[in-house]
Amino acid sequence: MGLFSSGVKGIEVVLIVEDEPLVAFDNENALAHAGYRVAATVDRYDDAVAAMAAGGIDIVVADIGLQGEHSGLDVARHAATLGITVLFSTAACPPEARDLGIACLAKPYGPRDLVRAIKVIDRMLAGGRPRVPPGAMTLFT
């Protein structure tokens, strides 16, 4: 991805937290083809926390429903303590997600929608005006 003209580092490294294997696979491929590096793809809270602890993650793409007792909301709470941006990807985004993430991408979505959503967030984080988000995306800010 590289640098913005203002010198601000853009989103380069993504952590995918998804418990549906086909969705996770599609997300990995779409992001890799778009030039992003996928730090890890995990389906449990503990694995997400471990991946974030390794550092270098710019954004977490998190499903709300996960295996185990923790949810994607718990992942987002942890990400917030580390200053990591969260994009939720879920069929039904609960109201409390607004306080924990920057946006929600409604399932089902296509791989292009995920890439476009991250580009919209990247532009916003750099201080630019967001382009038109994909139809399946709801911005919280």
Image (cartoon, rainbow, N blue to C red):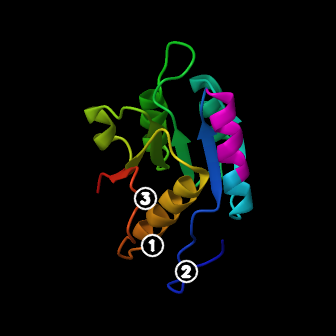
Name the residue beneath numbered marker 3. 134
Residue at image coords 68%, 54%:
30
Mark 3: amino acid: Pro
Find the distance from the CA under tag 3 to the CA under tag 2: 22 Å
Circle 2/circle 1 CB separation < 8 Å:
yes
Q: Which quadrant does the N terminus fall into? A: bottom right
**Few, some or many residues within 10 Å of mark 1 (<14, 14–19, 20+):** some
Q: Nearer the viewer, residue 108 or 51?
A: 108
Q: Earlier in the sequence, mark 3 or mark 2?
A: 2
Q: Quadrant of the C terminus?
A: bottom left
Residue sitting nearer the eye, 30 or 79: 30
Q: Position of residue 35 (x, y in %)?
A: 71, 64
> Residue lying farthest top?
69
| The label number, if any, that marks residue 126 in the structure image | 1
Q: Residues within 10 Å of mark 2 (few under 14, many from 20)?
A: few
State whether residue 98 is above or below residue 92: below
- Label 3's element? loop
Q: Position of residue 5 (x, y in %)?
A: 53, 86
Q: Which residue is mark 2?
A: 4
Range drawn in magenta: 20-29
Give the answer, above or below, for where 27 lies relative to 129: above
Say above or below: 19 vs 29.
above
Element type where label 2 sits in the image: loop
Tell me the distance, in whole angstroms, between the alpha carbons under discs 3 and 1.
Answer: 19 Å
| Residue drawn at the location 53% of the way across and 75% of the way down | 8
Q: CA distance from mark 2 to mark 1?
A: 8 Å
Give residue 60's position: percent from left, percent from top.
54, 45
Q: Amino acid at mark 2?
A: Phe
**Secondary element type, mark 1:** loop
2 or 1: tag closer to the N-terminus = 2
